[in-house]
Image (cartoon, rainbow, N blue to C red):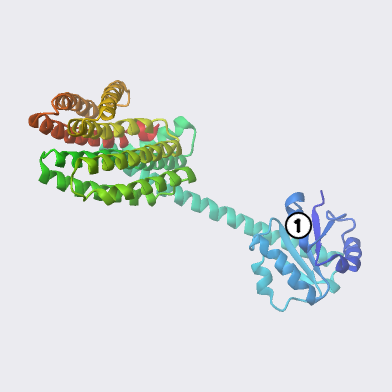
Amino acid sequence: MASLLLVFPSETSAAGASAALRALLAGTEFANPDETTCRSMVRKAAADAPRQILLCATQGAEEPALLDALKAWQGRPPCALSLACGSVPADAVQWVECGVHAWAPLGELDAVRLARLLAEAQARWQREADLRAEMHALRTRLDERKWIDRAKGLLMSARGIGEDEAFVLLRGAAMHANLRLGEVSRSLVEAAQWAEAINRAGQLRMLSQRLARLAAQELAGVDVRRGRVLRKESVQRVQQNLEHLDSLGLDSRAAHSLAQVRRAWEPLASVLDERAAPAALAELDERAEALLGAAEALTGALEATGARHALRIVNICGRQRMRAQRLAKDALLASLLGSDAVRARLTLTMDEFEAALLDLEQTPLSSAEIRATLAQARDEWLVLLGGVRNADSADGRTALVRASEALLLRFDQLTAAYERSLQVIMS
């Protein structure tokens, strides 16, 4: 591998200059240089990694070809870059902007001047490399400071602690993981962001079932005025969550899933204001199920993107909100439409809800707040089951609707608690 690469505008221009330059380099550390033309200069430099590159242009007319070739490096050549040309360049600025560190007239070069030219180029390139490294280190420290401050804020909010205690937690986590403090801080902030994203995608699952339940509730004549208020609020919540998720830098899989959610939401949104009737209710439920499926796929994609196993607990808890709404919806639909398929789905959802509730009660990712809220959710779950069994009566339907909203509130609280749990965001 040659330590010096001679670059000529073309093979023709190299014929005379090459021999003269090689004679001047004889006996130096750059003896036996390699050669190429400007067309293959970038590829050759990448393959051979020379210590220096010397551009050679015997005539001013040859310089534009060299300048064009240098543009590929955008002013940051991989090594020291010098120019031997027919005369001093008329516009030196453009050569400097392309990364050339030193130049001299080719006709005035002797062994001493050529050695001086190469040494000058090497010194300037090294100085630039040192300055770039220093600038990179400064930017890295500033970037790490930003992530550390954001991570401290998250921990202070999650634990109700002071700044010094939050910093001690971060430093301990970094030492335990054998990582830089900035790396741990950035991972913590990103984990919290993914937890929020999963929470919001999970809300879309719940809202698909809530909107269908509110339509069934209106047809059943249960708390109609309040139901319309909740429908308007739910539509706004869907749109806000879609906008938030759209603002994230999602990978291709998650972005595709989000687009599918939008496509599923549009046909459901278009029928929400139609007058309640059994036939319209069945169509609305079908569209709500389509949105549920798309939102479930999006939540799975986000959980995979986040690459945090502990985020699974946020997803499980968030899914319980959807199931509470789905149970109330299906109980009303079974009563109003007499559908066997809906009754079968109702039984399956009850089994899934109970299994997930047990999973949450047994998980080690817990706190006094979470345990107390889970106990309240267990009591309200029993009320909801009573409403499901008595959905053919007015009192049963009222209990069903109220219990589903109470469970929604409890699992909203639980999902938020898990989202800001220290164990989740630090895992």
| Left or right side of 134 for 159 | left
Q: Position of residue 145 (x, y in %)?
A: 42, 48
Q: Residue at x 32, y 44 (%)?
A: 153
Q: Position of residue 338 (x, y in %)?
A: 21, 30
| Left or right side of 169 for 252 | right
Residue indicated by mark 1: 52
Q: Nearer the viewer, residue 293 or 39?
A: 293
Q: Is residue 203 above or below residue 69?
A: above
Within 10 Å of the Cα at label 1, are there few (<14), some (14-19), or many (20+) other Cα atoms?
many
Helix, strand or loop at mark 1: strand
- The answer to whether one can see residue 204 in this image is no
- Of all residues, the one furthest to the left in this rendering is 395
Q: Residue at x 21, y 50 (%)?
A: 274
Q: Nearer the viewer, residue 425 or 315?
A: 315
Q: Position of residue 260 (x, y in %)?
A: 40, 45
Q: Position of residue 330 (x, y in %)?
A: 23, 32
- The answer to whether one can see residue 178 in this image is yes
| Left or right side of 161 for 121 | right
- Of all residues, the one furthest to the bottom in this rendering is 90
Q: Quadrant of residue 31?
A: bottom right
Please state, as top left, top right, bottom left or bottom right, where the C terminus lies in the image: top left
Q: Amino acid at mark 1?
A: Gln
Q: Residue at x 82, y 51 (%)?
A: 2
Q: Residue at x 79, y 69 (%)?
A: 84
Q: How many marks?
A: 1
Q: Quadrant of residue 168?
A: top left
